[in-house]
Amino acid sequence: MKDGGLGEFGRIRRFFAPLAGSGGLDLRDDAALLACNPGKQLVVTVDAIVSGVHYLPDDPPGLVARKLLRVNLSDLAAMGARARHYLLTTALPTTVADDWVEAFAAGLGEDQRRYKIDLLGGDSVATDGPAVLSLTAIGEIAAGAEIRRSGARSGDQIWVSGTIGDAMLGLQALRGSHKSMPAEQRATLIRRFQLPEPRVELGPRLVGIARAMLDVSDGLVADLGHICEASQTGATIGLPQVPLSRAAQQLGAADPALPARLVTAGDDYELLFTAPSDSADRIRQLSQELRLPLTAIGTIEKGAGVRLVDGEGKEVPLTNTGYRHF
């Protein structure tokens, strides 16, 4: 279905200008204005998603918009920052109709209200290829308080929020797998893929507790490897300790090789962090306050790389450690 005729600037005026905050100047100027509060510093991240790679072409546009926003909010949370604003760039085929863009903007508006952020501006272009959607999120944190990947120390415990691997199973379900699973469980897995939950409350609460942190986007093992590389450490995680949803546990009971695949799957957007062992009580208390499972899954060690071990301490071989972009 072709563009209904609004064109680039018509779409901006009708669908996106209502999302602009005061610094966005009604999206009428070439740039936005942004202030930083005293004693704070800005945290900026950018992520792009591509049709057919990060979402399915027939996914509802409102969900696509919300996923795009949320994966960026997850990156801010992983540094302990609170989100404030974002910029948006869309590269859309000319066959994308105005009603798709309208639903996309409505999805952004829904999550803007939920996360209390606003749009500053961006760009829109046409493409002959698949749709490419890029969002730059801007957050704020006390100067010097950010949690980096490079802070892990030997002896730290490794923790992860939520459950791991559900997004991979959700994508499989969207593609026709797991049909015998109860409809409610199947829908939950699909939602984990289409609409991740960025841990925006957890991240800032871990400032002063976590030494290193990131979000699980490429896979638990691969992303822990990024922490180890930046921190010049090694790590061991216990496969039985990795938290799995009930649906994943049931599938794993029928396929014992599945849990090892789930720890290399991407798109979970849970927070993975390290903390001194004497912080365990504070972390468990935080888990209770936020009503969010936080699970200790391993230990940072001297050396390099990530080891995955079974319940008997034997290393579990992996054919790959996570999603590779190239």
Image (cartoon, rainbow, N blue to C red):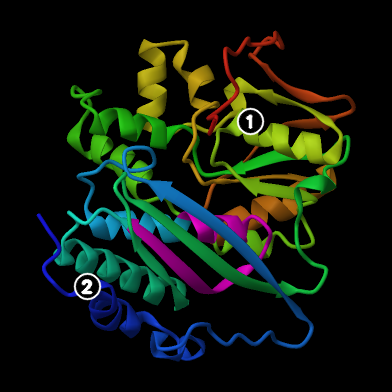
Dot 1 corresponds to which residue?
222
Question: Residue 71: x and y, percent?
Answer: 48, 54
Give the Cα distance between marks 2 and 1. Answer: 42 Å
- Give the mark, 2 or 1, whose residue is nearer the N terminus: 2
Question: Residue 280: x and y, percent?
Answer: 75, 47
Q: Amino acid at mark 1?
A: Ala
Dot 2 corresponds to which residue?
7
> Would you say residue 259 sits in the magenta stretch?
no
| In the foreground, 305 or 288 | 305
| 2 vs 1, front mark | 2
| 302 to the left or right of 52 | right
Question: Is residue 144 in view?
Answer: yes
Structural crowding at the residue carrying mark 2, measured as other residues with C-alpha within 10 Å and reported as few (<14), some (14–19) or many (≥20): few
| 234 to the left or right of 46 | right
The residue positioned 50% from the left and 71% from the top of the image is 86
| 202 to the left or right of 157 | left
Residue 326 in which image quadrant: top right
28 is higher (above) or lower (below) than 185: below
Q: Amino acid at mark 2?
A: Gly
The residue positioned 45% from the left and 10% from the top of the image is 256
Q: Which element carries disc 1, helix, strand or loop?
A: helix
> Would you say residue 78 sits in the magenta stretch?
yes
What residue range appears in magenta? Answer: 71-91
Question: Is residue 198 in view?
Answer: no
Question: Residue 135: x and y, percent?
Answer: 47, 62
Q: Any mark on residue 186, and which?
A: none
State if disc 1 and disc 2 touch (CB < 8 Å): no
Residue 137 in which image quadrant: bottom right
Residue 123 in which image quadrant: bottom left
271 is higher (above) or lower (below) than 257: below
